[in-house]
Image (cartoon, helix red, strand yellow):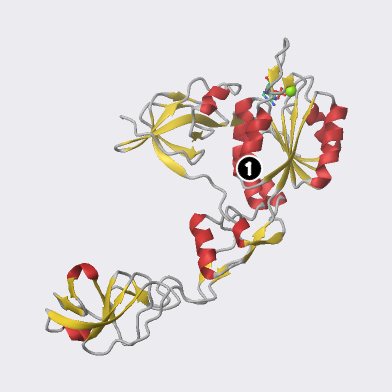
């Protein structure tokens, strides 16, 4: 193990070397929204499967309207889901609704709004061209075309597409199963009265939410005190039944940091300490074969550590192709000081102004201040060699969630 703090990118590279996509499972269509496709989806058919009308109007032969205005005889009316009983002959038309198959003989559709109807006699004001308002067969998707790639998350549109293609059973990656262990004898439940020296456990709630936001499954959440033996017993019991363990607290240099002691003694430690702020004491280890992310206890550090390391790992295990958060350029609202030698992740509220994003600091950046995280929708990544950036500087901001942006005055 390397003992000096690793740059975050090197730490992540070590993690990527040790985690791989899990196996597949086949699920019914209704169950795969939000899941990750394990195979490319190749279309078994043309979409639309037949040429059809893009408008409510009249199907006819364009050549019949060469000398428009022109009247044509109406022979039939069809809606979506119906097939015309007649074909369109010269001098005739068929009234057609959006989505109905184009009748034999017809080569175009004229919008209803551009016609006058008198009993069975329809008058068309203007000429038309072949193909007008017709959606040809295969216009959207061609048979044999790869429509969705392996490793993509099934979105609303993707789920709709799978339905269109008739994919009743879909192969997806198994969701990573994750165990969470919060350590610290000061911790109590959300509904417990606080005795002197106690605080409520908030990290396990942050981790639970973050794990689920990755499409992974929280199998169990445990809380331990600061006894190495207790921590070891919980980790050993958990390891065989999960794909990954996340711990919080007990991994720095204090007298009562049991996760550090247990992993150093019983696990294969790949790194401990990352050159970042917050979240420097962060260990990545394998206990038997189970990856363990030992995240720091401070409420901000645990979340930033998750973002930088556990999220990419869970995405990789879950088979996702993309793991990077969306980044945008933003301008600093105020001066920013940053430590040398460590990448800093600054919590910020991005607002959208007329000429781009403005990054507003969310107050004191102490790693214990959960309130600075609550107000943030982005992390600014400040490189290790930057110590000062004046207001107005351009910075890279990683978006933290799907929240919409407030429009702010710049
Ligand atoms: P540690 O890394 O265990 O020394 O914890 C660092 C700080 O984070 C201490 O102030 C802890 O009380 C706090 N802390 C640790 N675990 C949690 C937790 N699960 N929820 C809230 N705060 C925590
Ligand atoms: Mg602790």
Q: For residue 152, which quarter of the picture?
A: bottom right
- For the residue pair 195 and 285, the one nearer the viewer reads as 195
Q: Quadrant of the N terminus?
A: top right
Quarter containing ligand 2? top right
Q: Nearer the viewer, residue 279 or 228?
A: 228
Q: Position of residue 7 (x, y in %)?
A: 61, 38
Q: Residue at x 48, y 21 (%)?
A: 363
Farthest bottom residue in view: 90
Query: Which residue in the protein does label 1 denote?
Result: 212
Residue 275 visible to the viewer: no
Residue at 33% of width from left, 87% of height from top? Answer: 87
SS of the residue at dot 1?
A: helix
Q: Position of residue 303 (x, y in %)?
A: 61, 33
Q: Quadrant of residue 309?
A: top right
Q: Residue at x 56, y 53 (%)?
A: 322
- Residues 407 and 53: in front is 53
Residue 259, compared with residue 325, is above or below; it is above
């Amino acid at each position: 193990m390397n003992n000096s703090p690793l740059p975050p990118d090197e730490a992540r590279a070590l993690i990527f070397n040790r985690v791989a996509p899990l196996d597949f499972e086949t699920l019914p269509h209704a169950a795969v929204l939000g899941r990750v496709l394990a195979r490319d989806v190749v279309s078994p058919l043309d979409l639309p499967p037949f040429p059809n009308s893009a408008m409510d109007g009249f199907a006819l032969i364009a050549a019949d309207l060469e000398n428009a205005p022109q009247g044509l005889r109406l022979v039939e009316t069809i809606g979506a889901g119906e097939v015309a009983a007649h074909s369109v002959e010269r001098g005739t038309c068929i009234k057609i609704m959006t989505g109905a198959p184009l009748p034999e003989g017809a080569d175009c559709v004229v919008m209803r709004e551009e016609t006058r109807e008198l009993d069975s006699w329809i008058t068309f004001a203007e000429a038309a061209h072949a193909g007008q308002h017709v959606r040809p067969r295969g216009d959207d998707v061609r048979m044999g075309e790869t429509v969705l790639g392996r490793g993509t998350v099934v979105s609303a549109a993707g789920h709709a597409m799978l339905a269109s293609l008739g994919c009743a059973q879909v192969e997806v990656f198994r969701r990573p199963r994750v165990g969470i262990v919060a350590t610290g004898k000061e911790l109590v439940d959300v509904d417990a009265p606080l005795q002197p020296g106690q605080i409520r456990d908030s990290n396990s709630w942050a981790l639970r939410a973050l794990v689920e936001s990755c499409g992974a499954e929280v199998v169990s959440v445990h809380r331990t005190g600061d006894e190495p033996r207790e921590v070891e017993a919980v980790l050993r019991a958990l390891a065989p039944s999960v794909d990954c363990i996340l711990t919080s607290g007990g991994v720095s240099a204090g007298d009562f940091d049991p996760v550090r002691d247990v992993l150093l003694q019983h696990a294969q430690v790949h790194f401990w300490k990352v050159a970042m702020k917050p979240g420097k004491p962060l260990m990545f280890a394998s206990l038997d074969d189970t990856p363990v992310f030992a995240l720091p206890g401070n409420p901000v550090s645990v979340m930033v550590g998750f973002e930088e390391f556990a999220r990419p790992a869970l995405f990789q295990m879950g088979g996702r192709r993309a793991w990077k958060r969306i980044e945008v350029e933003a301008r600093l609202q105020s001066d920013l000081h940053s430590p040398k030698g460590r990448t800093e992740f600054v919590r910020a509220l991005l607002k959208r102004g007329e000429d781009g994003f403005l990054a507003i600091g969310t107050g004191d950046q102490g790693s214990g201040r959960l309130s600075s995280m609550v107000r943030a929708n982005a992390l600014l990544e400040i490189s290790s060699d930057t110590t000062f950036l004046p207001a107005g500087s351009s910075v890279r901001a990683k978006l933290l969630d799907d929240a919409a942006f407030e429009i702010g005055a710049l």
